[in-house]
Amino acid sequence: MTTRFTGGCMCGAVRYECGTDPIAMGNCHCRDCQRATGSAFAAAVLVPVSAVKITGEVKYYEVIGDSGGIVRRGFCPNCGARLFGQSAASAGGISIMAGTLDDSSWFMPKRTSTQPARSRGTTCIRICRSSPGRHRHSRRIEVLR
């Protein structure tokens, strides 16, 4: 696993660097994440906030999430790219949106939320690590309905 990764917004005004392995990687299908992304899910990497160095100005917008707690979303005030998320549920952690990684080739979501809010008409595809003994780059695909 990469022990150092970088990323940033579309215009380059906000950059970040992380010097540790992720705590978790996943796709969240809760209704709050659907509204925030305009998509079926939010893909994110969770890391300790103390391991992330952010340069540039980040604006935060707070909402009450599906959990009932406050969720903070960090955006670039210039281009509007969503970069970060923080909530009471991940105290001491910060979520980095996977789409903002400079190199997202290593992003492999290990968790997919099973929130009942997942859109009924959406077919979700989860790529899983293959079973031991198979070629190390093999993957199996599961279709979740």
Image: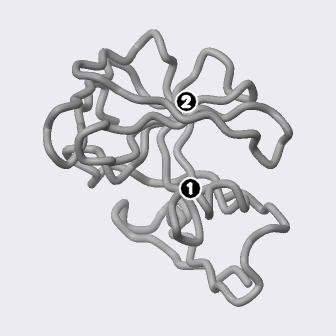
The label shown at residue 110 is none
Residues marked 2 and 1 touching at CB (< 8 Å): no
Q: Position of residue 138 (x, y in %)?
A: 39, 70
Tell me what residue is drawn at x 46 percent, y 9 percent. 50
Helix or strand or loop: what does disc 2 sit on?
loop
Label 2 amino acid? Ile
**In this rendering, would 70 be left or right of 134?**
right
Query: In this rendering, is residue 36 above or below 64?
Result: below
**In this rendering, would 86 be left or right of 129?**
right
Q: Quadrant of the C terminus?
A: bottom right
Q: Position of residue 3 (x, y in %)?
A: 31, 25
Q: Quadrant of the N terminus?
A: top left
Question: Which residue, given by chain and number where applicable, does mark 2 sit on?
Answer: 23
Q: Position of residue 44 (x, y in %)?
A: 49, 46
Q: CA distance from mark 2 to mark 1?
A: 22 Å
Query: In this rendering, is residue 23 above or below 99?
Result: above
Which tag is nearer the camera, tag 2 or tag 1? 1
Helix or strand or loop: what does disc 1 sit on?
helix
**In this rendering, would 15 be left or right of 115?**
left
Hey, which residue is sitting farthest bottom in the picture? 121
Residue 34 image-quadrant placement: bottom right
Circle 1 crowding by C-alpha within 10 Å: few under 14, some 14–19, many from 20: few
Tell me what residue is drawn at x 51 percent, y 75 percent. 140
Q: Position of residue 91 (x, y in %)?
A: 68, 19
Residue 59 image-quadrant placement: top left
Tell me what residue is drawn at x 52 percent, y 37 percent. 73
Circle 2 crowding by C-alpha within 10 Å: few under 14, some 14–19, many from 20: few
Label 1 amino acid? Ala
64 or 126: nearer the eye?
Answer: 64
The label shown at residue 36 is 1
80 or 90: nearer the eye?
Answer: 80
Tell me what residue is drawn at x 19 percent, y 49 percent. 10
